[in-house]
C-alpha cells in the first residue's frame, strides 16, 4: 500500500494537495519528517544502521525516523516510527520535542526519550534497520567526520547535544536528590 503524505506551505499550513512517497515534492511545499534519538542514563544516543536495501542512505548510520503519513501529526508519526523500526512502545508523555526545523523538503520534528535497553533486545524492522548501537557524543562526532553517520548539519547536532547536556544535568540533580536521606 503506498504511503500518502500531506503537504504544507513554507509557513507550515496544510495544503489540500497530497503526495505519494517517491513522487517529487513541488518546489515551495514540504512534508513532515520526524527523527527520534533514544538516550540512556549515561547520555549515549541510540543510532541505527540503515538496511542495505532502503532507498535513502542504505548502509549508513542515522537517526530513527521517517515521514508522517496523511492525517498524522509529528508526535503520532514519531511514536509509530519508533515502534515500527525498533519495536519500542512509548507513551506520548515520554517523548520530548528537542527542536523543529525546516529542511529542504520537510518540516522535521526531532524527539528524544529515555530508554534503558540493551542493543540486542530491540526488535528491528529488518526491511529498514540492519543494527543499532549506543553511541557516545565523541564517537558520534567521529562517525560524522568520517562519513559513517549521516550529517544532519552543525546546528542540528548542536541543538541535539545541548539537549543531551541538559538531560544529563537533570539526571545528576535527580540522583543527588535521591541520595539525600532525611531521618
Image: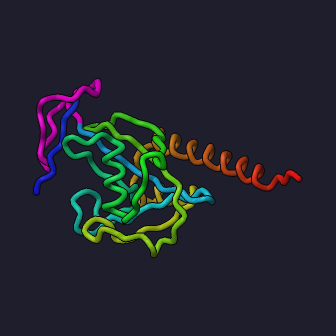
Residue at 37 percent of width and 71 percent of height: 123
Work out whether residue 84 or residue 100 is closer to the camera in this orientation and state it.
84
Residue at 76 percent of width and 49 percent of height: 177
The way the protein has been coloured in the rendering is rainbow
Residue lying farthest to the top in this orientation:
11
Query: Does 81 sit left or right of 99 as displayed?
Result: left
Taking the magenta stretch, the answer to whether it contains residue 11 is yes
Q: Quadrant of residue 100?
A: top left
Q: How many labels were placed on the picture? A: 0
Residue at 10 percent of width and 57 percent of height: 1
Query: Does 10 sit left or right of 134 as displayed?
Result: left
Please state the extent of the stretch shown in magenta in the rendering.
Answer: 9-30
Q: Position of residue 49 (x, y in %)?
A: 37, 66
Q: Position of residue 108 (x, y in %)?
A: 35, 40
Q: Position of residue 24 (x, y in %)?
A: 13, 42
Work out whether residue 174 or residue 85 is closer to the camera in this orientation and state it.
174
Work out whether residue 125 or residue 93 is closer to the camera in this orientation and state it.
93
Taking the magenta stretch, the answer to whether it contains residue 112 is no
Residue lying farthest to the bottom in this orientation:
120
Most common secondary structure along the magenta stretch = loop
Q: Check the image and report above or below for 79 versus 10.
A: below
Residue lying farthest to the front in this orientation:
183
Amino acid at each position: 500500500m503506498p504511503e500518502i503524505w500531506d503537504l504544507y506551505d513554507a509557513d507550515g499550513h496544510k495544503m489540500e494537495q497530497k503526495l505519494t512517497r517517491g513522487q517529487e515534492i513541488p518546489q515551495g511545499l514540504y512534508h513532515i519528517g520526524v527523527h527520534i534519538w533514544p538516550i540512556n542514563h549515561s547520555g549515549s544516543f541510540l543510532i541505527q544502521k540503515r538496511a542495505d536495501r532502503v532507498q535513502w542512505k542504505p548502509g549508513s548510520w542515522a537517526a530513527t525516523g521517517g515521514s508522517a503519513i496523511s492525517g498524522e501529526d509529528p508526535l503520532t508519526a514519531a511514536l509509530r516510527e519508533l515502534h515500527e523500526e525498533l519495536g519500542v512502545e512509548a507513551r506520548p508523555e515520554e517523548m520530548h520535542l528537542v527542536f523543529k526545523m525546516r529542511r529542504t523538503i520537510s518540516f522535521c520534528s526531532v524527539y528524544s526519550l529515555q530508554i534503558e535497553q540493551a542493543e540486542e533486545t530491540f526488535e528491528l524492522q529488518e526491511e529498514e534497520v540492519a543494527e543499532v548501537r549506543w553511541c557516545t557524543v565523541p564517537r558520534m562526532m567521529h562517525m560524522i567526520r568520517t562519513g559513517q553517520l549521516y550529517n544532519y548539519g552543525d546546528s542540528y547536532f548542536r541543538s541535539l547535544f545541548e539537549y543531551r547536556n541538559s538531560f544529563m544535568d537533570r539526571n545528576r540533580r535527580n540522583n543527588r536528590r535521591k541520595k539525600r536521606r532525611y531521618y
